[in-house]
Amino acid sequence: MTGVSRRAVMAGGAAATLAVGVGAAQRPPSNAARFSLQYAPHEGSFASRGGRIEQIAYAADQGFTAWEDNEAAQRSVAEQTAMAKALQQRGMTMGVFVASMPKWAQSRPLLGASDGAEREAFLADIRASIDVARRLSATRMTVVTGFMDPRVPVDIQTARVIDVMRRAGEIVAPHGIAMVMEPLNTRTDHPGVYMRTIAQGYAVARGANSPGVKILADLYHEQIQSGNLIPTLDTCWDEIGYIQFGDNPGRNEPGTGEINYARIVEWLRGRRYAGVIGMEHGNSAKGRAGEEALVAAYRRIDQA
């Protein structure tokens, strides 16, 4: 996840998009082979094909079986409902949306601060997100554990983050939902965030001790911050609730950087991973050529 949305590019003219796009989503499936794992594109992955609903239809025609939308909670109920209908008609699984959007420009919230007001606001966002998850049939929602407070010792902040995540877990777990905490790299994209590695997420998840609190393993961020991807996944596997791909450098499709995603896919198959894998990255080339390259890149790693 980034502070600048890649998914909102096609969000303008929502009413027209919904009217035209629902018909596109109802097209019969093509003969394209379904991917063996649930890779999830997002709005903007196939921008040349039309609006959000049309992109869902196109993704399904290429064999994708999942979708994710960071901004879903900020969309209207009508847009959420239309997206859910399109996914259901094409037999696609909804991946993550962001349950409590950070204020990136302000480096907030400070969930480990001495003042508990931002923790209470975070919990209010989590409560409000349950209805969004229900509409979308989503069982995972992304949370960012905020930014560091330089005035408070790190261990105190950790204790407070664990406490608030435990409370949030109590809110979502009865609904069959898990929040997935996303560690973000500080070297390239998100200086100052609290949670920086999957290992740190593991410690918080173990402390929260809730089926509603897991880790989002975004391998782009982890590669930049720590590397050692497969051993880290293996060690922290019991607390990982969602996975996202993105190559480094560049944060584009697999094969454009240094990460051996074919080997990671092979490892995930060995683990019998059946969850969604978010395509949390851009396209290395613009337009339809870039979209075709995106599909081809996932075909290659899916054959591992």
Image (cartoon, helix red, strand yellow):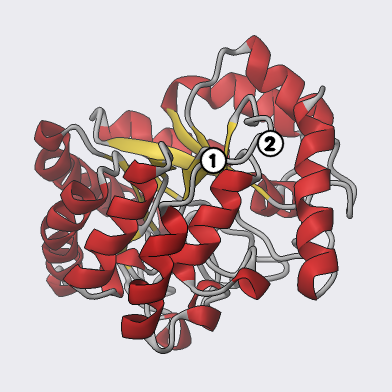
Q: Residue, x 48% and y 54% (percent of image)? A: 195
Q: Residue, x 89% and y 53% (percent of image)? A: 257
Instruction: Tell whether 155 sits left or right of 265.
Output: left
Residue 226 on image: x %, y %: 72, 45
Q: Which secondary structure lies at badge 2?
A: loop
Q: CA distance from mark 1 to mark 2?
A: 8 Å
Answer yes or no: is residue 2 visible.
yes
Instruction: Tell whether 128 sits left or right of 142.
Output: left
**Which numbered disc covers residue 100?**
none
Answer yes or no: is residue 4 visible.
no
Q: Residue, x 16% and y 42% (percent of image)? A: 172
Q: Which residue is mark 1?
A: 29
The residue lying toward the viewer, choosing from 262 and 192, is 262
Q: Which secondary structure lies at badge 1?
A: loop
Q: Residues within 10 Å of mark 2 (few under 14, many from 20)?
A: few
Q: Which residue is mark 2?
A: 32
Relative height, residue 132 to residue 95 (above, below) = below
Kind of residue at badge 2: Ala
The residue lying toward the viewer, choosing from 294 and 202, is 294
Relative height, residue 123 to residue 286 (above, below) = above
Q: Residue, x 76% and y 65% (percent of image)? A: 283
Kind of residue at badge 1: Pro
Tell me the quarter of the image containing the C terminus. Answer: top right
Q: Quadrant of residue 190?
A: bottom right
Residue 214 on image: x %, y %: 37, 36
Instruction: Tell whether 81 sits left or right of 250.
Output: left
Q: Residues within 10 Å of mark 1 (few under 14, many from 20)?
A: some
Residue 301 on image: x %, y %: 80, 33
Badge 1 vs badge 2, beta-carbon distance below 8 Å: yes
